[in-house]
Every structure is written in C-alpha cells, then in structure tokens.
C-alpha cells in the first residue's frame, strides 16, 4: 500500500497540475486583478497544506500519528475521493473556459457562468480541491492531513470571499439571484 500511496497520489495530483498549467494559457485578458499580497495570502497556505501531506516526516512527530488505521479500504476510499475531487475541479475549469483565472480577476467581457458544476455550487473548483485534499488525508491517515485540510479550507474561504465581493460588484442582482439558489461550496449546506 505504501508504494501505491507514493506513486498513485503524486500521479493524480501531477496529472491535474499538468492539465491546469496547459489550460491556463487560453484565458481572456483581465480588467481587474488582485494584488500580489492578496494572492500570496491564499497560495502560501495551499503550499503549507501540500507540504503537510507530502513531506515524509515532520518536525512535530505528533502530526505523524495516525487518526485512521492503515487499511486498504481507507487507502482506496481516499484515492477515490481524491480522483473525484480533482475530476470535479477539472469539469468546473473546463466549464469556465476562457473566464478562468488562478488569480482573483474580473476578465475583459467577463461572463457569469451558472451552468454545469456551477449549477450545483458557486465555487466548484474549490469544492473539488477540498474533496481531493480530504481524500489524500484519508488515504494518508495521519493528523497532519487534517491540519492540511484546515489550511486549504482557510485559504479557499478567504479567496472565495474576495471573489464573491468582486462578482457582486460586477454582476449585481444577477449574482445575488445566483447566490440565492446555489450554495458556495457544499451542496445544500454551505
């Protein structure tokens, strides 16, 4: 199982990252863009979360303690969650098309996308990433995985709130109506 963890999860995440990088080249120009400091406030926690999950050992041994027993079932449930989360994020990214940006922006001729995965939640890329991190943490089974999820949640929630503010400014009542019918991250809950 450890070899599967060592190779399967990096393969899933690297495949997702390669798609993300390649597809980032076909986007609209931006009309407004968040500052570098703002961007770092959600990038740094994501990097910390990734390090928590993938470093072989941490300086705080208590974080390496298991919260789940090492079983094939937990591993494969985590793998399925990770794959599903990354696939959901890719579906959302594909659906956004040229409106996507890794940085909080308003694009030139920005469109309000409310179909596909955006019918389910307003921020499906973040939903997918949270599920993928959760799956990776379940497969790993150590406390540091739960800490990583907390870091990811804080980073994405902060970015989500900034995006919501900008979308309200850009689309006004149309976005307010959309917010009333689609939850932010978790269908029917949040």
Image: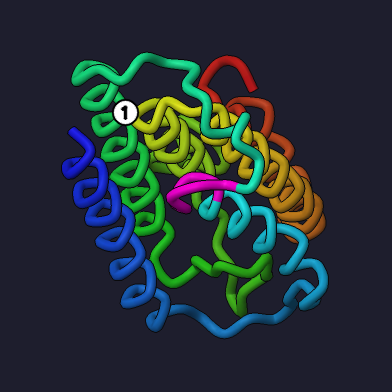
- Image quadrant in which the C terminus is located: top right
Provide the residue designation for mark 1: 78
Q: How busy is the neighbourhood of tag 1: few (under 14 within 10 Å), some, or many (20 plus)?
A: many
Secondary structure found at label 1 = helix
Residue range (magenta): 52-58
Image coords of residue 14 (percent x, y): 30, 62
154 with respect to 189 (left or right): right
Asked whether, in this view, residue 19 is left or right of residue 146, the answer is left
The figure's colour scheme reads rainbow
Let me know if residue 54 appears in the view.
yes
- Picture coordinates of residue 178 (x, y %)? 62, 36
Q: In front here: 3 or 28?
A: 3
Q: Residue at x 63, y 69 (%)?
A: 103
Quarter occupied by residue 180: top right
How many numbered marks are there? 1
Q: Who's the residue at 39% across and 37% down the image?
A: 136
Asked which quadrant contains residue 21, the reply is bottom left
Q: Which image quadrant for residue 162?
A: bottom right
> Residue 169, image x and y in percent?
81, 57
From the viewer's side, name the closer residue of 95 and 185: 185
Note whether 75 is above or below 157 in the view shown.
above
Q: Is residue 119 left or right of residue 58?
A: left
> Is residue 53 a member of the stretch shown in magenta?
yes
Between 52 and 152, the residue placed more toward the observer is 52
Q: What residue sits 50% from the left and 66% below the top?
A: 100
Residue 158's x, y, as percent?
76, 48
Q: Which residue is located at x 61 percent, y 74 percent?
A: 107
């Amino acid at each position: 199982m450890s070899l599967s963890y060592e190779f399967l999860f990096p393969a899933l995440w690297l495949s997702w990252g390669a798609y993300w990088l390649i597809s980032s080249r076909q986007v609209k120009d931006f009309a407004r863009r968040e500052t570098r400091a703002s961007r770092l406030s959600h990038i740094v926690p994501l990097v910390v979360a990734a390090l928590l999950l993938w470093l072989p050992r941490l300086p705080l041994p208590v974080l390496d303690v298991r919260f789940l027993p090492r079983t094939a079932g937990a591993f494969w449930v985590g793998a399925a969650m990770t794959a599903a989360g990354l696939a959901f994020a890719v579906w959302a990214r594909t659906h956004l098309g040229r409106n996507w940006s890794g940085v909080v922006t308003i694009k030139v001729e920005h469109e309000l996308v409310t179909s596909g995965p955006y019918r389910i939640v307003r921020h499906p890329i973040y939903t997918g990433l949270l599920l993928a991190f959760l799956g990776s943490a379940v497969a790993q089974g150590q406390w540091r995985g739960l800490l990583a999820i907390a870091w990811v949640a804080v980073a994405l929630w902060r970015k989500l709130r900034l995006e919501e503010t900008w979308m309200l400014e850009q689309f006004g009542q149309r976005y307010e109506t959309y917010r009333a019918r689609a939850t932010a991250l978790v269908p029917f809950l949040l």
